[in-house]
Structures are given as structure tokens and as C-alpha cells.
Image: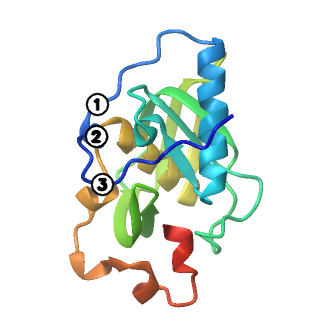
Amino acid sequence: MAIREILKMGDPRLLRIAQPVAAFDTDELHMLVRDMFETMHAVNGAGLAAPQIGVDQQLVIFGTDVVNPRYPDAPPVPRTVLLNPIITPLNGDEEEGWEGCLSVPGLRGVVPRFANIRYSGFDPYGDPIERVATGFHARVVQHEVDHLLGKLYPMRVRDFSRFGYTEVLFPGLDAADDD
């Protein structure tokens, strides 16, 4: 296993549309998933998309079994590996919430997201996954899947008066957790 370098906003690889995963249950895929979890945990991430480490595949991971120090007020999200995801909003309701990103270190912004979604895709073995998610869980999934579409959360910010440095906006939060 290895901790991979996380690409930063400005790297053109983050703007590409990721390719579907075609081969499931391979040694290479399982190693990539392990590396992604190790990388995500090393920086206290809530999720990580393969394009963030320069891998052009439709693969996202998210969730932990414990409270995330970058989002101490958010509930835990189930640990998930999701390939070739599809998100379907269950209605038009949106919720605004603060987001950060490992590829946009040290910054946070308020982003509107669908409040209730269904997401589907596959696990690394090719078995189907289908879940309904709300709240922070739905936000994390949408944020990570955006990376597969070449979108970073600042592209979704509507009000830039609610976008800035973590250390200024959240003085009680350790800004080092956002780097």
C-alpha cells in the first residue's frame, strides 16, 4: 500500500471526465482501492476520487466508521467503494452546506447539493450497489462523483461571500487538517 500524491486545483487532470471501470476484481483495482483508503485516511479525508490521484477511472471511496476531524459535526458515513456511479436526485430539494476538498487545501465554501439522492454503481468485485442517501452522506457522494465529471466544489459555489480560508472561517478547526 502507498500514500499517493493528491493533485491540487489548477492541475488539468482534475478537469477531465473519468473513464468507466471495465475490469472488476483485479489485483490492480484492489491495490488502487487500498492505496486510496490509505491516502484518504492519512489526510483525514471524507472521500477521495481516483482522478484526485491522477487515475482516470470512475472510482470513488468515501466514509469512515468514526467522526471525521475535518467535519467534526457531521455524522459518520458508511465506508464505501463505488465504481461507475450514477446519482439520481429523488426530488428537487437542495441543501446548502460547507465543503472542503483535499484538492483545494485550506479553503471552504458553501455549496448547494441535492438533499435526497439514490446512487448506484458497483463494488470492486462487480457486484451492484444501490442506496438512498440524505444529508452529509448525500453531500459526500455528490462531491466525490463531481470529481469524475471534472468538477471541483468551487465551480458549484453560488455566493462567494461564503467562500474563504478555513483558518478564518472556522477558527476553532485545525487548519492543518485542510492541507
Task: Give the mark, 3 or 2, whose residue is nearer the N terminus.
Answer: 3
Task: Give the mark, 2 or 1, whose residue is nearer the N terminus.
Answer: 1
In-image side of 44 versus 165 (left or right): right
Quarter of the figure with residue 79: top right
Residue 163's spot in the image, x, y percent?
Answer: 30, 76
Is 87 rendered above or below residue 137?
A: above
How far apart marks 3 and 1 lie (CA) works out to 15 Å
Tell me if label 2 and label 1 are in contact, CB under 8 Å.
yes
Q: Residue at x 43, y 65 (%)?
A: 99
Inspect the image, locate mark 1, and give the three-letter code of the amino acid beneath it: Ile
In-image side of 12 versus 165 (left or right): left
Residue 130 visible in the shown view: no
Residue 36's spot in the image, x, y percent?
Answer: 59, 39
Q: Residue at x 31, y 37 (%)?
A: 149
Inspect the image, locate mark 3, and give the three-letter code of the amino acid beneath it: Met
Structural crowding at the residue carrying mark 1, measured as other residues with C-alpha within 10 Å and reported as few (<14), some (14–19) or many (≥20): some
Residue 17, numbered label: 1
Quarter of the figure with residue 105: bottom left
Which residue in the protein does label 2 denote?
A: 150
Which residue in the protein does label 3 denote?
A: 9
Task: Give the mark, 3 or 1, whose residue is nearer the N terminus.
Answer: 3
Residue 129's spot in the image, x, y percent?
Answer: 61, 26
In-image side of 68 versus 99 (left or right): right
Structural crowding at the residue carrying mark 2, measured as other residues with C-alpha within 10 Å and reported as few (<14), some (14–19) or many (≥20): some
In-image side of 161 versus 116 (left or right): left
